[in-house]
Image (spheres, coloured by chain):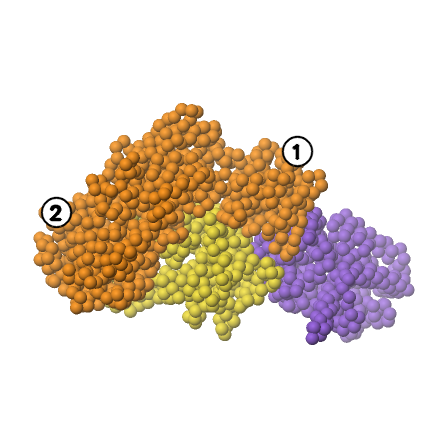
Chain colours: A purple, B orange, C yellow
């Protein structure tokens, strides 16, 4: 028996579920959803869990991560209850639950915390950069001199490690919540690793949505980002492309960087305009963290591109300052988004698929054993 | 009796091509000795009509039109009230459903003409019954929203009104409501109940006489001449009124029967109307300690939609509870409000209210409430199966549980009168349910109140004619008639007021009311030979006939609906209309030519209800379906007017079978006179025995229930009957 | 005493009722109907709920009341084009479209036998054809034929005119305008079913075996295109598995935000059409709430108890058509069993909602809300029936009776 908890709905409002009470449970959303299945029914069921305040159910659910917010439910909803956005808000809520530091919750529910944390990291980064940077050579661009690798790289490695630890520890908490006491045979973990990889790299479920263009754009952003991430790391260890001398145009790294920049810039601008236009169902409602993410991302990408352009054009001072700002955007973007808010889904989504498969397989195996025993 | 009858045969529409008109005319002129028999190729045209009119000017007082069905050209062949018109259906029911130029078709046409002529000869133009001292006053019983509205609307139309209210104040149930739902866009707001203005207008209207703290002691008489005795403060007053609107409303279902929902057991379980009162007084608080509520649960269908309590849906509880949920939310937007429902019934624009209540954060639970219990500090706990979540849920810490109790009509109370001994013995349709609810106290033989349908509602059974209660001139309106919301009540009361003034106007002219408006005939009783058998008084579906001390019938013509059920019931054939009588139909049957047995041309008399079966036969013709050539159709006002003597007449004449085509009866009866077809069927049951005794097979008489849409079934029905008659063999009385 | 006459616009059940009730109190009534016959949408129904009785039964009585009543003047093929004046003294311009058949018509049917041209039968929602000269339906009142000039080949053909024994065909008939002077006006122009073309997720009206509830009435009617056989439009085969999709347009803020009030009961009723004829058939009704108010609950319970009737709490998300078989697959969340249903049906009936005609053609003298329902009137002009609210038949009749009362009040005491 579930206790009705009227406060849960109020709580979730802060995560963006503002219309959940409009739902009168016709079930249209679940019926039109291309991803909803008999085993994993949503979004209607989850509208209900929120209304009634069935926190426990939600905590242990994977379904919010199985929704890719194509907005079909929203378009079809006769009550304009925005089921898609409620699923989104549940992802925000779950992210805050998985996060043991409590920062995610603060970021999602408090404007003050958002502003202070972003500001702190932004200006802190600037302070560190200008405080610890090398001399600014003005005759020509010498970024390495301005930002000496022996300082930047170790800091970067430490920063990255911290983020990874945070994110993975949150993933572990997610694992505990959704798997609970289910005993999953060890070999299943290994057998299903491909699920994790495939979903991480392709977000193939998003491709099952009615509207495919979102998937393409998302892939652009994802591949662009992944590429940028890899290139930065390659550079950290090999100084392959990021040198004081701009490499020639045919340098493979440069071509890859160009792709990454354009892909990310296009996708980000498209998302920003989408949120302003509010035409597409998935852009009708924007949580403050959605804008926080997009603005930080845009800042990062724009400054990143500018840094490269200024280097090309041999403008030393603009290069250094822009680079400083590039870092000032990058640090809160990575520091806040990856472990605590929106960008954490890069881990939660594939892991959700992975965990779902683990559960499915386990049940399958149990049934097989039962039939064998029965036989 | 029409003294001078002329026959006019139309040869248009193929009649002239299909029939031997000359031979047909001979039936009129030679056999029936009519002075005038003319034919015309286009009788309904101006030339044809002119032909008839000229003859009328020369003294014709009866016209037989042998042409198309009586369903068409009614206005064309109307020659004024002093001329009797009889239509012989040669088109739809003769040439369109029988082969042309065929001996049998010709015989059919001739028989139809014979019957028409005989009928016209026996018809007289009716003289309207005009009661003396007709009152144009409308009596409205009940001073709630429906009553006040009906009174006001009738008065606005210029009719005096007498309004009787049981309580000291007008306003009734609705006056106790805190707010009502706005009926204007956006349809989701609450507004003050607009009853006070109406009451003020009623009070100020000189045409409305108000009796409060008063009750009806007695209503005698009939439409136009109701004599009402009103008891007020120990004195009585008499009023003569023309028509009555019954608007005594409904009361909430007795919540003490809802112990399973905690009522009576826990102080904080209250009914919806108690909440209204509380809201109207100011704050919504816990009855146990007077603290403002922070959490409230509404349980809908508390008693309604429950076979143990009220099997029907009370229509307004969903809306009322939505409204009350808003009261709570307006008092405290943070209050937790839950609504437990089965189906949320917010029709029409109430959907907007539903949405509004949802957006305020009220949570709805769909499913059965399993238990209401008490927790600590007199808080309440509601357990329910929630279909929407797919599990059992429990709502705790509730300050208040509000039961949306349903509506019970005021007519549902009171004892059913004891069934008289004589009735028990006799076979007959189940008597009307009349509960002694002490509301109208009619001096009617059948009982003191309106007959009720299921659950005590004196509702009309008719979809097309929702005001047709079974007591002429008495119209129920508002929640007494069916559970209804405020706008419906206003609408219903306005409509009922119209029916009341309409009844008065028609009665003043001597016309019947629905469904035989413009019928000025009425039954006349020749009581010399009356055996006081009480058949007419018992069977009249409208309670039009009282009895005197010696149990002689006392007809009330203004109550009469002119169906002729009494005429059919009377074994002594004492009841007749000027233009419709037992003898008349009997003569029609007797004038049918019955061929000798060896000719192998059986004859079947079809007694058809003129409202449904007769048009259905026409439709068979319009669809060119072929009918058995043996049938001879006689339209009846209602099968209830079937007198068993006609069966005897027909059989003794050698007619092989009699087929009665009437409306569906039973729970979903379609008979426009409520019980006509049912009574006919009971009477036939009685005759079966007699027939067998006369060595006549009871199979010769059959009754079928047909609707107006059964025209495609009718050929088969007749064919099956004819086949059965063939098996039975020819009527042995042929040729006697 | 002012002008004691009443104009009733719309000759459906509401208009007929208002006209008859007002005239039986003593008013002169002009009844104006756009179609060539009276009765409106109820003539196209097979049965009424909850009694399952035929509408023509009550209409027959009403027509009889009109036929016998010289105070009612019926104008068919007529539309109101202009209203001036005020309560007690309105001048109304009415345009009469030509019928091309005069009142002389005896409905002998000869013209139809010779007419070479055909037209889709709008009375049966285009599911069959009539000749260009036709009787709208067998119960049509007035029982006069009418010519569809769009389909008619005109004077070049002239066959009907030649064969008519009473010279009732007049192909040169012109529209006429007349002015009526009335004391009050009742607006009772009724409703239209919601346009299925807008229901894209249900196939936009393009799937052959997805029909609307109003079409279902014709399919089940003995005087319908199939003589009452309920068969699939695509191949004429009898149906064994049928789905009713409730709230097809209604209770949907993307379409009709209000509840149309009658569709639940209409579908329950139509389920009986199928199950009475074929008790083996499987009938599914997909719903959000079953809104069977008052004593309609009895009817709901009765139908609910029928074998092979499945009530599924869950709105249909979408319908897909199998082009080869014409079968339809529906997806819905069955909330009672908590399953996601994927069921295939031979025919699907959309319970399309009611749209007041005043939405598409707002009359000048009435104020309507954004959905087209009449909310207020100038004095002397009253809405009646489904222009006021989505009503069932009994409520429409009540409402029309009430409107007649208001109209009468407008004609007295001034």
Residue at 35 percent across and 28 percent down: it is B238
Nearer to us in this view, A296 or C162: C162
Measured along the vertical axis of the image, is residue B151 above or below residue B664? above
Residue at 44 percent across and 39 percent down: it is B415
**Quadrant of the image for the C terminus of chain C?**
top left
* Chain letter for the residue marked with disc 2 in the picture: B
Q: Quadrant of the rendered structure where residue A370 is?
A: bottom right
Q: Could you say where residue C136 lies in the image, as x and y percent from the top left?
A: 32, 60
Residue A24 falls left or right of residue A346: left
Q: Could you say where residue C35 lies in the image, as x and y percent from the top left?
A: 34, 55
Mark pair 1, 2: CA separation? 86 Å
- Res. B3 mark: 2
Measured along the vertical axis of the image, is residue C235 above or below residue A267? below
First in sequence, mark 1 or 2: give its number.
2
Nearer to us in this view, C245 or C135: C245
Q: Could you say where residue B56 lies in the image, as x and y percent from the top left?
A: 13, 48
Please count the marks in the image.
Answer: 2
Mark 1 sits on what residue?
A: B290
Q: Could you say where residue B59 lies in the image, as x and y percent from the top left?
A: 10, 46
> Which element carries disc 1, helix, strand or loop?
loop
Residue B379 appears anywhere in the view: yes
């Amino acid at each position: 028996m579930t206790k009705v908890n009227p406060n849960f709905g109020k709580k979730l409002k802060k995560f963006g579920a503002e219309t959940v009470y409009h739902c009168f449970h016709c079930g249209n959303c679940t019926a039109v959803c291309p991803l909803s299945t008999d085993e994993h029914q949503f979004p209607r069921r989850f509208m209900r869990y929120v209304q009634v305040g069935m926190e426990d159910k939600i905590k242990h659910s994977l379904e919010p991560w199985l929704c890719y917010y194509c907005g079909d439910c929203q378009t079809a909803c006769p009550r304009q209850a925005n089921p898609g956005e409620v699923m989104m808000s549940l992802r925000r809520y779950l992210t805050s639950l998985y996060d043991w530091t409590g920062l995610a919750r603060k970021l999602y529910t408090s404007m003050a915390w958002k502003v202070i944390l972003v500001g702190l990291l932004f200006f802190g980064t600037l302070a560190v950069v200008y405080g610890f940077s090398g001399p600014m050579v003005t005759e020509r661009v010498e970024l390495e001199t301005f930002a000496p690798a022996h300082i930047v790289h170790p800091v970067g490695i430490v920063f990255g490690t911290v983020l990874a630890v945070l994110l993975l520890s949150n993933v572990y908490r997610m694992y505990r919540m959704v798997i609970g006491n289910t005993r999953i045979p060890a070999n299943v973990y290994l057998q299903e690793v491909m699920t994790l990889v495939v979903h991480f790299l392709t977000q193939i479920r998003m491709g099952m949505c009615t509207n495919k263009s979102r998937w393409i754009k998302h892939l652009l952003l994802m591949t662009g980002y992944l590429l940028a991430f890899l290139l930065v790391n390659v550079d950290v260890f090999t100084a392959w492309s990021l040198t004081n001398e701009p490499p020639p145009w045919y340098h493979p790294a440069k071509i890859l960087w160009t792709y990454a920049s354009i892909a990310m810039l296009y996708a980000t601008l498209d998302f920003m305009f989408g949120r302003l236009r509010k035409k597409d169902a998935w852009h009708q409602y924007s949580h403050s963290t959605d804008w926080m993410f997009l603005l930080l991302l845009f800042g990062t990408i724009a400054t990143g591109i500018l840094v490269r352009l200024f280097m090309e054009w041999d403008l030393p001072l603009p290069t250094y300052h822009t680079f400083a700002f590039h870092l000032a955007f990058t640090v809160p973007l990575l520091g806040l988004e990856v472990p605590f808010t929106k960008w954490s889904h890069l881990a939660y989504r594939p892991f959700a698929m992975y965990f779902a498969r683990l559960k499915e397989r386990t049940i399958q195996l149990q049934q097989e054993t039962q039939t064998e025993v029965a036989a | 009796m029409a003294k001078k009858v002329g026959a006019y045969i139309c040869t248009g529409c193929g009649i002239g091509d299909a029939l031997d008109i000359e031979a047909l005319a001979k039936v009129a002129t030679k056999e029936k000795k009519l002075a005038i028999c003319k034919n015309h190729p286009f009788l309904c045209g101006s030339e044809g009509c002119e032909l008839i009119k000229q003859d009328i000017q020369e003294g014709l007082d009866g016209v037989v039109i042998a042409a198309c069905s009586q369903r068409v050209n009614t206005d064309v062949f109307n020659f004024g009230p002093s001329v009797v018109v009889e239509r012989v259906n040669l088109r739809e029911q003769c040439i369109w459903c029988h082969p042309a130029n065929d001996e049998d078709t010709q015989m059919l046409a001739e028989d139809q003409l014979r019957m028409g002529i005989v009928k016209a000869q026996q018809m007289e133009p009716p003289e309207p019954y005009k009661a003396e001292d007709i009152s144009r006053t409308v009596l409205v019983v009940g001073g709630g929203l429906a009553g006040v509205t009906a009174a006001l609307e009738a008065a606005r139309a210029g009719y005096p009104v007498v309004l009787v209210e049981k309580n000291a104040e007008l306003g009734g149930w609705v006056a106790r409501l805190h707010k009502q739902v706005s009926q204007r866009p956006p349809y989701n707001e609450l507004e003050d109940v607009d009853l006070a203005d109406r009451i003020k207008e009623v009070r100020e209207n000189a045409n409305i006489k108000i009796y409060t703290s008063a009750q009806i002691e007695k209503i005698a008489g009939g439409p136009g001449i109701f004599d009402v005795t009103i008891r007020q403060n120990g004195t009585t007053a008499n009023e003569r009124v023309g028509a009555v609107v019954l608007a005594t409303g409904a009361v909430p279902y007795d919540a003490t029967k809802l112990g399973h929902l905690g009522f009576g057991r826990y102080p904080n379980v209250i009914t919806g109307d108690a909440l209204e009162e509380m809201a109207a007084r100011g704050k919504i608080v816990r009855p146990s300690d007077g603290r403002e509520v922070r959490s409230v649960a509404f349980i809908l269908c508390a008693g309604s939609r429950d076979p143990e309590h009220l099997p029907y849906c009370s229509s307004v509880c969903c809306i009322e509870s939505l409204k009350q949920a808003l009261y709570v939310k307006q008092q405290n937007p943070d209050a937790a409000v839950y609504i437990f429902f089965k189906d949320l019934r917010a029709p029409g624009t109430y959907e907007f209210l539903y949405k509004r209540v949802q957006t305020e954060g009220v949570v709805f639970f769909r499913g059965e409430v399993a238990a209401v219990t008490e927790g600590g500090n007199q808080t309440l706990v509601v357990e329910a199966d929630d279909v929407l979540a797919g599990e059992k849920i429990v709502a705790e810490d509730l300050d208040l549980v509000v039961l949306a109790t349903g509506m019970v009509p005021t007519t549902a109370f009171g004892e059913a009168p004891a069934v008289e001994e004589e009735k028990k013995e006799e076979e007959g349709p189940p008597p009307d349910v009349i509960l002694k609810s002490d509301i109208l106290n009619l001096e009617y033989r059948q009982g003191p109140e309106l007959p009720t349908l299921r659950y005590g509602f004196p509702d009309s059974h008719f979809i097309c004619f929702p005001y047709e209660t079974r007591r002429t001139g008495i119209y129920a309106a508002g929640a007494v008639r069916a559970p209804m919301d405020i706008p419906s009540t206003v609408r219903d009361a306005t409509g009922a007021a119209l029916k009341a003034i309409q009844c008065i106007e028609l009665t003043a002219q001597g016309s019947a009311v629905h469904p035989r408006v413009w019928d000025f005939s009425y039954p006349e009783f020749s009581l010399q030979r009356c055996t006081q058998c009480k058949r007419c008084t018992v069977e009249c579906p409208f309670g039009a006939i009282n009895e005197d001390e010696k149990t002689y019938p006392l007809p009330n013509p203004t109550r009469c609906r002119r169906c002729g059920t009494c005429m059919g019931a009377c074994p002594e054939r004492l009841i007749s209309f000027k233009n419709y009588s037992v003898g008349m139909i009997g003569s029609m049957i007797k004038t049918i030519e019955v061929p000798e047995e060896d000719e192998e041309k059986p004859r079947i008399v079809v007694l058809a209800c003129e409202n449904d079966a007769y048009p259905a036969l026409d439709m068979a013709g319009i669809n060119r379906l072929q009918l058995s050539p043996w049938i001879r159709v006689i339209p009846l006002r209602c099968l209830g007017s079937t007198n068993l003597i006609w069966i005897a007449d027909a059989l003794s004449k050698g007619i092989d079978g009699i087929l009665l085509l009437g409306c569906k009866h039973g729970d979903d009866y379609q008979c426009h006179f409520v019980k006509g077809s049912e009574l006919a069927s009971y009477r036939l049951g009685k005759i079966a025995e007699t027939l067998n005794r006369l060595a006549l097979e009871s199979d010769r008489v059959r009754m079928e229930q047909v609707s107006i849409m059964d025209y495609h079934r009718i050929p088969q029905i007749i064919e099956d009957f004819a086949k059965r008659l063939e098996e039975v063999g020819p009527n042995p009385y042929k040729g006697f | 005493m002012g002008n004691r006459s009443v104009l009733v616009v719309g000759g459906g059940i509401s208009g007929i009722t208002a006209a008859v009730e007002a005239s039986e109190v003593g008013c002169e009534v002009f009844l104006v109907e756009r179609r060539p016959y009276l009765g409106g949408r109820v003539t196209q129904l097979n049965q009424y709920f909850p009694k399952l009785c035929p509408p023509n039964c009550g209409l027959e009585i009403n027509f009889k009341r009109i036929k016998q009543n010289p105070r009612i003047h019926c104008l068919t093929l007529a539309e109101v084009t202009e209203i001036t004046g005020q309560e007690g003294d309105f001048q109304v311009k009415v345009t009469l479209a030509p019928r091309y058949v005069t009142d002389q018509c005896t409905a002998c049917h000869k013209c139809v036998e010779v007419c070479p041209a055909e037209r889709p039968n709008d009375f049966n929602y285009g599911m069959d054809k009539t000749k260009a000269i036709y009787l709208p339906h067998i119960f049509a009142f007035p029982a006069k034929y009418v010519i569809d000039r769009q389909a008619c080949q005109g004077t070049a053909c002239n066959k009907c005119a030649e064969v008519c024994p009473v010279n009732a065909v007049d192909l040169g008939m012109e529209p006429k305008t007349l002015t009526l002077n009335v004391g009050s006006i009742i607006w009772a122009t009724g409703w239209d079913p919601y346009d299925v073309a807008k229901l894209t997720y249900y196939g936009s009206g393009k799937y052959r075996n997805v029909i609307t509830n109003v079409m279902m009435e014709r399919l089940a009617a003995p005087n319908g295109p199939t003589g009452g056989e309920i068969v699939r439009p695509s191949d004429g085969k009898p149906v064994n598995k049928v789905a009713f999709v409730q709230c097809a347009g209604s209770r949907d803020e993307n379409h009709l935000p209000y509840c149309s009030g009658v569709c639940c009961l209409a579908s329950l009723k139509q389920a009986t059409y199928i199950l009475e004829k074929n008790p083996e058939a499987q009938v599914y009704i997909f719903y959000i709430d079953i809104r069977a108010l008052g004593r309609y609950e009895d009817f709901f319970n009765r139908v609910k108890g029928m074998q092979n009737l499945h009530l599924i709490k869950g709105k249909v998300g979408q319908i897909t058509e199998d082009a080869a078989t014409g079968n339809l697959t529906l997806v819905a969340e069955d909330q009672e069993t908590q399953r996601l249903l994927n069921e295939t049906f031979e025919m699907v009936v959309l319970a399309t909602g009611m749209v007041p005609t005043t939405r598409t053609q707002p009359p000048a003298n009435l104020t309507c809300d954004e959905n087209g329902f009449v909310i207020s009137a100038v004095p002397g002009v009253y809405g009646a029936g489904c222009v006021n609210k989505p009503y069932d038949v009994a409520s429409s009749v009540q409402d029309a009776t009430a409107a007649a009362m208001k109209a009468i009040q407008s004609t007295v005491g001034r």
